[in-house]
Image: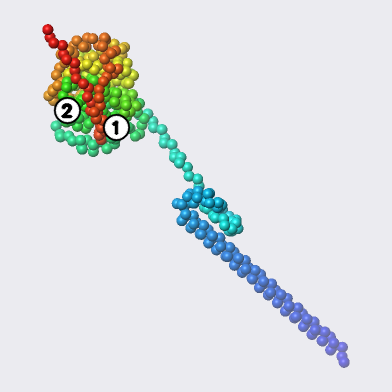
Amino acid sequence: MSVAAPRQRCRGWRSSSSAMTRLMLGRTLERICKGVLLLCLLHFLIMMILYFDVYSQRFDLFSRFNNGRNGSRNNVSGAAGSGHHYYYYNLSRPNATLASYLAPGEQLVPTVQPETNQTPLPKPLPPCPEIPPGLVGRLLIEFGSQMTMERVQKENPNVTEGGRYTPPDCRPRWKVAIIIPFRHRENHLKYWLHYLHPILRRQKIDYGIYIINQLGEETFNRAKLLNVGYTEAMKDGEYDCFIFSDVDLIPMDDRNLYHCYDQPRHFAIAMDKFGFRLPYAGYFGGVSGLSKKQFLKINGFPNEYWGWGGEDDDIYNRITLNGMKVSRPDVRIGRYRMIKHERDKHNEPNPQRFNKIQNTKNTMKKDGISSLTYRVIQFKRYALYTNISVEIGKPPPRPIKG
């Protein structure tokens, strides 16, 4: 036997052993790859299961929250007495399992933000300007067209019941009561309301309108009705300024501002019936204004001027005797038109007025707001004004001429 034969057998064994090694290594790598693949698949399945589990729990919780939102407060308060325990949940952890936080029998209540009744405080209003920017100046006043209360009400939708108005955009300096002595002047009142409500609103005034209606047919007493108006307005609101106006006088310029001043104010200084001039230096009739302090300082107005005339001169005397002066607007601004009419019945000129005017100094302490007596028969708020119907008595018998 030759030496080459064993060598050949040895080489064949080595090649066979190498092939087996490579085969085993390939199978091992294949198994490892399959294992890694299976692990990846398993990881994916676990992630999907967790995802859908959390999603379903969230959906269930939000459904219960929305369905029970309106009754959640009642359920919470009711459960406090039933012995059940409630917990608030937090969804900020997406992988948390909510059931793991709850013991058997415990219920889940959604987190509700505590409600507060606090509302933002309104921004304080600025003071109203001394000269309101919406004034138009000279006005055209006419009484030819027919006037109705329905028309006046439609023209003034912002005026509230009782003839009240407050500027919505600023804080007025004065709270003004406008007082009108009245009897049988319904047609005049329509025109007065038609013109004055828009004027007063443009003037940015906080105001209320009071019609003081003298019942019966006794002699008319303008000044006493004004005292009644002051008293009743003070019961109805916290007024600090009072404008006393005849119902037949309409201002011809809205720059004639209806509020109070440092001194008693005479507004109607230039009426058309006087040729737009002041008839005499001591005239204080038609439309005037006093603050509460000024009114009380003169003891209000006299109660004993029955019939036409004299009471405005008595008021002027009271003002000057108490150390005050009458203030007036410029004559070009204080112009008024009067609604023409016949003199009222039972309002004839008072023959005693001149004697009374001379005795103001002696009578003003005991005759005035301090001695006022009257009886309210009706107090009624209408859309554009407040009507107060009163009985004020009758004049004393006049002395018989001997």
The residue pinned by badge 1 equals 164
The amino acid type, in three-letter code, at marker 1 is: Arg
**Where residue 194 appears, x then y in whole percent?**
21, 32
Quadrant of the snapshot with the N terminus: bottom right
As drawn, is 390 to the left or to the right of 2? left
Count of residue discs: 2
Q: Residue at x 62, y 68 (%)?
A: 42
Callout 2 secondary element: loop
Callout 1 secondary element: loop
The numbered mark at residue 184 is 2
Q: Is residue 398 above or below residue 255?
A: above
Badge 1 or badge 2: first in the primary sequence:
1
Q: CA distance from mark 1 to mark 2?
A: 23 Å
The amino acid type, in three-letter code, at marker 2 is: His
**Where residue 223 appears, x then y in whole percent?**
23, 19
The nearer-to-camera label among 1 and 2 is 2
Nearer to me, 52 or 89: 89
Instruction: Give neighbour class at mark 2: few <14, some 14-19, many 20+ (Cα, 10 Å).
Output: few
Rendering quarter of residue 2: bottom right
As drawn, is 43 to the left or to the right of 361? right
- Can residue 77 be seen? yes
**Where residue 122 appears, x then y in whole percent?**
41, 36
Q: Quick check: marks 1 and 2 in contact, CB under 8 Å?
A: no
**Where residue 49 appears, x then y in whole percent?**
58, 65
Q: Residue at x 31, y 23 (%)?
A: 241
Rendering quarter of residue 280: top left
Q: Residue at x 29, y 35 (%)?
A: 160
